[in-house]
Image (cartoon, rainbow, N blue to C red):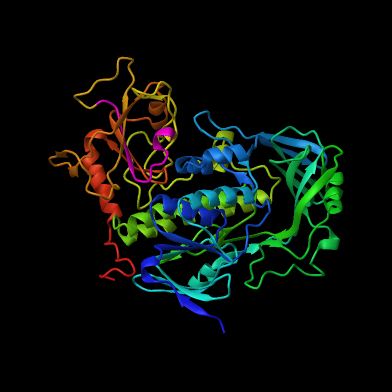
Amino acid sequence: MARTRATDAPDAPDVLIVGAGPVGLSTAAELRRHRVTCRLVDRLPARLPYAKAVGIQPRTLEIWDRMGLVRDVLEAAVPLRGQLLYVDGREAARIDLVLPPEVPYTFAALPQYETERLLEEYVAGLGTVIERGTELLSFDQDATGVTARLRTSDGAEEEVRAAYLVGCDGAHSTVRKGLGLSFEGGAFPEEFMLADVETDWDLPDGYGLRSLHRSADGATDDLLVCIPLPGGSGARRYRMSMLVPPELSARRGGPPAAGGDGVAHGMEGSRRPELSHVQAVVDRLAPRPAAVSHLRWSSVFRISHRIVDRYGDDRVFVAGDAAHIHPPTGAQGMNTGIQDACNLAWKLALVLRGEAGPALLTGYDTERRPVGEEVVGRTVRHATEAGVPADADDPRTMMLREAQLLVSYRGGPLAGPPHGPRDAPQPGDRAPDCTGLTASVAAYPLRLLDVLRGRTGHVLIRYGAAPAEAADADGSAPVTVTVLPRTAASTGAGDARPGDGGPVPGAGAVYRDAAGEFARLYRPDGPTGFLVRPDGYLAARFPLDGTARALAGHRGVLSAAPAPPAPGDPGA
């Protein structure tokens, strides 16, 4: 009979996170940055040594920059410069991954276990350690919290009380099943194999390879996809994926069996391809003769495309693969999950601190599920083509979309009304980075990311001269950056303007738009204010003389409903 113990109420976390992959770790990192207590549990006894998700998008690097983690990532990753496409032995396309110069980061590759290591170290530095070998058995929620039942690494069963539960537990999520969420979609009939190997070919450094063979009817009947990785031992290292050969197939006259939950997605540990299997595909499809070596690991895997009907229910939420799964085309999955985590965490923090009502949390599903639906649809479409996106977008727009820089929440419940040019950054859009900001003390130009790094609250940016102010001697306009006292939901500080909706925050740090880059990218319509959310998206854009009114409006959005008492509080 299992031993049972219960946590003491004073030690109960604000949030229980199930799953310590990149998404669960990102959720914990953002919550801890916002000074929210959490427990992070994972049923696995150790980090898996597999280079599964390897592509790092520029938007993810921006998130890690705000966290203060990006330097460690840049030192460990390698750049992804493009992709070479071969069809039936001939080069069909060369895609260069080029972004506009104002985007601070390019595309990169890093093995998933390295991403997890860096995030795990970051989270540990904030006081949260993964509880390995700990499995979620079940949970129940009520008006004031969630009661979860765990089995720990020593076999004991433990009852945990938390204000909220976040399931980052993958494609076969226990949290998703416990909520009764639907997970509609299907599976690709093909079986694939993954391998982490080195090769001696002389393809351009930093370029991935996609080589395919088409049958007489135009269908792809042979495939090789290679993504460069850091850490080769003399030759170049790649994560390769390809179709499974007949001797490793589980078809046996029918489609491969799905998991016990009907979801056929992920790696299978029972069938491990050998180096000879990989070499045979390279011999058939590589642009020129090459030898593979140093097989670190390999696996057979299946791909499904599914998405939940909703991203949460009351006090329980799902993120990452627990909410959406799809083909790995374009390295969208892990990065989309990390953005899920970032979007949810700041909202949970505001509600837990009593600075926003629980209705704010409905914005997680409203904002993120349409993104998940678009990513699932786009990756399925691209996976059935030759690997080259066939969108009608121009190349610049296509690259920005792949980099996840065009994700927008315009028109959503948390976005203020538009102001200024329609094609300028508007509420709900990502707040662009820019360079060329100068300050009176710093003798070098700053990027906006430098100014925002480490911030956890809402930030108010005021551009242009107020009536009593003038431009600097060099003609550049002032850019004032103010971190709001708590959040935009707090009462603020500063001088009230009669009839304008309340107090205006006092003066912040003043920078100069010396290079004119802020004006070029944000396109202010005269003196203009911008309210930036904790996740780096614009919450509001408004004429500068309407600052108090805009902040009051956003406070109203955040405080749409009273915050509930936390578990254990006298009012609970």
Whole-percent x, y for residue 523 in the image = 37, 30
Q: Residue at x 28, y 34 (%)?
A: 508
The segment highlighted magenta reads 450-465
Return the residue found at the far left. 498
Residue 301 colored magenta?
no
The image quarter in which residue 247 lies? bottom right
Q: Which quadrant of the figure contains the C terminus? A: bottom left
Return the residue found at the far top. 473
Q: Residue at x 66, y 57 (%)?
A: 48
- The relative height of residue 415 versus residue 256 in the rendered view (above or below) is above
Q: Which quadrant of the figure contains the N terminus? A: bottom right
Whole-percent x, y for residue 287 in the image = 82, 38
The image quarter in which residue 476 lies? top left
Viewed as shown, does residue 137 lie left or right of 556?
right
Return the residue found at the far bottom. 1
Whole-percent x, y for residue 79 in the image = 64, 36
Viewed as shown, does residue 156 lie left or right of 12?
right
Residue toward you, 473 or 232: 232
Whole-percent x, y for residue 281 in the image = 83, 49
- The relative height of residue 566 versus residue 277 in the rendered view (above or below) is below
Residue toward you, 319 or 152: 152
Query: How many numbered discs, if any?
Result: 0
Viewed as shown, does residue 47 lie left or right of 285?
left
Residue toward you, 244 or 506: 506
- The relative height of residue 199 versus residue 305 in the rendered view (above or below) is above
Residue 28 visible in the current orientation? yes
